[in-house]
Amino acid sequence: MPIVRNAIIRTEGTTGLCLTERLMKALRNSGFVGLLLLLSVECLGQNRTVTYGFWNQELLSGEVGLRARYRNQQRILASGFDERIRGTLFGGRLLLNSKSFIVHPNLMEIDFEGEFNPEKLDDQYTTIPDRSDARTLSRMNLRTTFFREKKLTVNAFLNLSQSYVNRENFTNSRTTRRFFGGGIFYKNNVLPASITYEEGNWDQNEVETGRDYTYWKRSVKAKVSKSFFTNDDNKLSYSFDDYIRTEYYLPVPRQNKVHLVELNSNIPLDKMRNYNLFALISNFNQRGDDDFNRFQIISSVTMRLPKSFRMNINYNYFDHVNPFYRLNQHRGRLDLRHQLFNSLSTNIYGEYANNRHTIYKEDDLRTGFEISYLKTIPTGRVNLSYSFQDRYFNRQSEPVPYFVTNEEQVLADDKITLLEQPFAEISSVVVKDVTGTFIYELNIDYLLFEQNNYIEIRRIPGGQIPNNAKVLVDYTALLPGSYKFNMQSQSFTASVMFLYEFIELYYRWAKQDYSFVEATDFLALNYILQNLYGIKFKVGFVRFGIEYDDYRSTIIPYQLIRFNTNMLWRFKRRLLFSLTGNVRYYLTIADRQDELYTDISARLAYSFSKNTKLNLELSYREQNGYQIALNYLTAKAELNMIIRKLYITLGVEVYKREYLNRETINFNGAYVTVIRKFKAR
C-alpha cells in the first residue's frame, strides 16, 4: 500500500459499512463522476477500511536552478567574408514530477512531468547555432489512468514540448511538439482488447537554412488477442493513420491516409513444440499523394527432427498495386540444417520466386549449400566456412521505361549504396522517409552519383537523414528486354585466433560469375572477385585491427584499407577512459582515387570524490571524397559538483568545422548551471 497523505485508517466491528456503501449516499446525485467512483472503489474488508481524501499526493520531486552561457563564433567564407559574433544567455530552470490520485488509487491516477527553462538572451545569441545535442525550452507530459487494477482500464495523455536539437554538430533546429490521446484496455482471459487514439503536430525550423516543416498525424489503433489452444498466440489488429506534411518548397501539403489490418499467429503443432507454425497476414492500404495497396502473407513452419536435423519451410505471398503498376509475387524456400556436435554445421536450401509485374515476368530459382566449421585449438580457435549458390533467372519483358516506387535503402556513412535497378534516370530520383510523407532534398540531405550504369546515393551529415536510416526511393529506370542467365556465387572465410585472443588472422574470398547468358543491350551484370585480408590484436584493454579489401567489380570496384580501434580502461572506480576510431582509406573507388573517411571519439571520466566528477569528450570526423570535403572537431570539458544539496556544473566547449573549402567555423563557449533538487512523499 503506498504512503499517502490524508489517509485515515480505523478499525470497525463486523457490522461496519464498507467504503462503497458510504460513498453511495454522498454520490447519489453526482452523475458520471459518481459512477466512476462506484466502479473503482471496493470494500477493503469488514474489519479494516481505509478512507482517503479527495486529492492524494504520492510523490513530488523536481529541480529549481539557474544557468548562464557564453558563446563566441567566427565564420569565414571562401569569398573573404569574416564574421565574429558573441552572445550571452541567462536563464532559470524549473522541473516538476508528480504522482497522485483522486479519492482512490483505482479511480484516477495522475502522472505529471513539467519542465520550464525561461531565458534572457541578447540579440546576437540567437544567430549563433547551439552546439548542445538537445536543449529543452519547455515540456509538459500529463497522463491519467482510470481503474488501474480493474479489467477495464482507461488512460489519457497530453504531451507538449519545445526544444532545440543539434544534428551531428551541423544543423540546429527549433522543434515544437503537441500530442494528445488516450486508450481503453480490457483485460481478461478470453478476449483481451484495446483501442487507442493519438493526434498531434510537429513543427521544425532549421536555424541556419531557414527550412520549415510541419507534420500533423492522427492515429487510431485497435487490437484483440485470442488463444484457441494451450500455447498458441493470435493477435488481430487494425490501425488508421492520417498524415499531413507541409514543406517550405512544396506549394501544397502532402497527405496520406493509411488503413492497416494485420493478423499475427504463432501456433505450436505438438506438445513438445518441436513443430511450430508462424503466419502473418496483412493488408496495407494508403490513399493520398502516394496511393498503393499491399497485401501479403508471410508464413513458416519450423521442425526439429531427429539426429540433430532442423527443417524450415517458408512461403510468402505479395501483391502490390499502385497507379503505375501491379506486382504479384509467390516465394517459397526450404532449408535443411544439421549440427554435428559444436563443430560442424551444414545447410542445404532451395528457393523459388515467381514474379508477375504489369510489364514483365520473372522466374528466379536458387539452390545452394553452406558449411561452417569451428575448432578449438590450444590458446585459441579456428573458423572455416564455405558457401555456394547457383541461381537461374529468367525475365520476359520489353525494353521500356518503368517507374520504381518505394524501393527500400539504408544509408550508412561506412557503406556504398546503389539503387537496385541500372540505367536509372538521375533527375527522376525522389527520396522519402519510411512513411512516404517527407521528401528529402538533393544536395542538402543527400547526394547522387553515377557509377557506371548505376546510381550511388549518399546521405549528407547534418541533413534530415540520420546515419543508418531506412529511406524509400522512387525513380524511373529503363527496363531491359527479355534475358536469362545462370549465376554462380561462392564465398570462403577463414580465421585463426591464438594466444588467448592476442592475435587473430582472417581472410575472405568471394566470387560471382555468370554462364549461359542471353542478354540485351541494356543488361548490367555484376562480375565480382573479392579478396579481403585482415589482422586483429587485443592487448589488455586495447583492441585494434587493420584490413585490406580488394573488391573487383564491373559496377563499382574499389581497393580499401580500413583501420579500427577500441579501448576501454577503468582504474579503481575513479577513472574511465574510452576511445573508438575508424579510418577508411580508398586507394581507388571506381574511377576515383584517394578518398579518406575518419571517425574518432574519446571520453575520459574521473571521480575526485563521490560528489566531484570531471568529464572530457573529444570527437573528430574527416570526409574527403567525391563532392565531399569535411573536417570537424568538437571538444568539451565538464566539472560536476554537489555542495550542500546544490548540483553545480561548469563547462567549456570548442567546435571547429571546415566544409567543402567554402566555409570555416570556429566556435568556443562556456556555461554554468546551479540546480537544487527536491523530493517529497
Image (cartoon, helix red, strand yellow):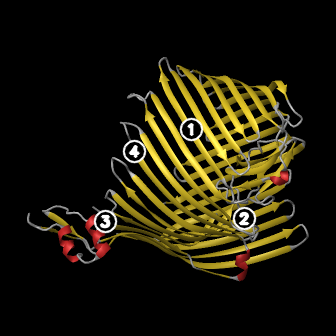
Mark 3 vs mark 4, foreground winner is 4
Tell me if label 4 and label 2 are in contact, CB under 8 Å. Answer: no
Mark 3 burial class by Cα count in 10 Å: few <14, some 14-19, many 20+: many
| Amino acid at dot 3 | Pro
User: Which quadrant of the figure contains the N terminus?
Assistant: bottom left
Mark 2 burial class by Cα count in 10 Å: few <14, some 14-19, many 20+: some
Look at mark 4 in the image and give the residue it sits on: 226
Of callouts 2 and 3, the N-terminal one: 3
- Residue at 36 percent across and 36 percent down: it is 230
Find the residue positioned furthest to the top.
307
| Amino acid at dot 1 | Ile
Look at mark 3 in the image and give the residue it sits on: 105
Q: Is residue 610 shown above or below 537?
A: below
Tell me if label 2 and label 3 are in contact, CB under 8 Å. Answer: no
SS of the residue at dot 1?
Answer: strand
SS of the residue at dot 4?
Answer: strand
The CA span between labels 2 and 3 is 46 Å
The CA span between labels 4 and 2 is 48 Å
Look at mark 2 in the image and give the residue it sits on: 171
Of callouts 4 and 2, the N-terminal one: 2
Tell me if label 3 and label 4 are in contact, CB under 8 Å. Answer: no
The CA span between labels 3 and 4 is 30 Å
